[in-house]
Amino acid sequence: SWTPDTMVSETITAIQEQVGDRRVLCALSGGVDSAVAAALVQRAIGSQLTCVFVDHGLLRAGEAEQVKEDFVRATGVDLVVADERERFLGALAGVTDPEQKRKIIGREFIRTFEEVARQLESDRGIDFLVQGTLYPDVVESGGGDGASNIKSHHNVGGLPDDLQFTLIEPLRAMFKDEVRQVGAQLGLPEEMVHRHPFPGPGLGIRIVGEVTEERLEILRRADLIAREELRAAHLEREIWQFPVVLLADVRSVGVQGDGRTYGYPIVLRPVTSEDAMTADWARLPYEVLEKMSTRITNECEGINRVVVDITSKPPGTIEWE
Ligand code: XMP
């Protein structure tokens, strides 16, 4: 029967046989799947693996550090960090259309990854690319493209023809909860192992309106407060995902201290779901919502209103863009 123990040792043996003494590349996103996949490959072949982390500046508070520091400490992996925050902000300047944002972020991501991969390839030769494909993805891609036309999803993988690597997919037989167990078994940081799903385009699609550093800063703070309060209430595992969204092109009048304010709203979007294809809005306790609201309006400059999204999917999607 399935145990993380046997899964780890069998997968490691399989990777060692597949790779031999050749070299492997893996892109880390900060998510569970790529982290566990990379950690498994690292266990199997050590320094023959190089990981690449493209810091696009659109992750949540603490997440880039989790990859650059905690993950590296836990695994000893060889990591190349591409700090491309300015590149992404520059490419997103003036852009408000959700699909255009998604395309720009996806494009810049692939370009950056490609540049790094090309450099590594010419330095030392690379034969394999690790992908964090799970069993449900394998099944799903056999049967049509599902809902993928509603939003253009961004994932690593579409590399140009002259960079051809053989894929290693160490999670191909696993479900998400098994991936988490394997991650824990490998000693990955707890926060990484139990992270909620997070979209590739990151906070870029959680700011309705133009993405700027100032707005990202506000959203990161609000998002961190929501995460802290959810955790304090021990509700993290009850919830599938909890987007926090900044409506940067809406302003409303408020009052604080003895003055009028004219600020932006933050939307809380906690949902329950089995597979993200459908979702229901999560009935969070009022006390928890109250705490989040009070803290967000007190601690986030420019935010004077907090609203809760009570739309299921369909008709709403989980993300706002
Ligand atoms: P929606 O908003 O379509 O999201 O209900 C369904 C699930 O997909 C996630 N999502 C993405 N994940 N790249 C990803 O890897 C993307 O571009 C992307 N867009 C949405 C979303 O967070 C939810 O879990």
Image (cartoon, rainbow, N blue to C red):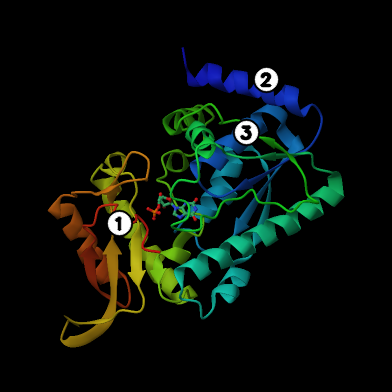
In the image, which disc is placed on residue 13? 2
Q: Decide if residue 204 is in sight here.
A: yes
Question: Which amino acid type is shown beneath numbered disc 2?
Answer: Thr
Crowd around label 2: few <14 · some 14–19 · many ≥20 (10 Å): few
* Whether residue 258 is situated above or below residue 206 in the rendered picture: below
Instruction: Using the image as rendered, state which of residue 193 and residue 129 is in the foreground.
Output: 129
The residue at which mark 3 appears reads as 169
Could you tell me residue 287's position as x and y percent? 14, 54
Q: Quadrant of the C terminus?
A: bottom left
Between the C-alphas of marks 2 and 3, the distance is 13 Å
- Mark closer to the chain start, 3 or 1: 3
The residue at which mark 1 appears reads as 226
Could you tell me residue 105's position as x and y percent? 56, 64
Q: Name the image quarter holding residue 78.
A: top right
Q: Secondary structure at mark 1?
A: helix
Could you tell me residue 18's position as x and y percent? 74, 26
- Asked whether mark 2 and ligand 1 are closer than 8 Å, the reply comes as no
**Image side of residue 317 versus residue 50, left or right:** left
Q: Secondary structure at mark 2?
A: helix
Crowd around label 1: few <14 · some 14–19 · many ≥20 (10 Å): many
- Residue under the point 86% across and 51% down: 122
Between the C-alphas of marks 1 and 2, the distance is 41 Å
**Image side of residue 25 versus residue 120, left or right:** left
Could you tell me residue 255's position as x and y percent? 17, 82
- Mark closer to the chain start, 1 or 2: 2
Q: Name the image quarter holding residue 46.
A: top right
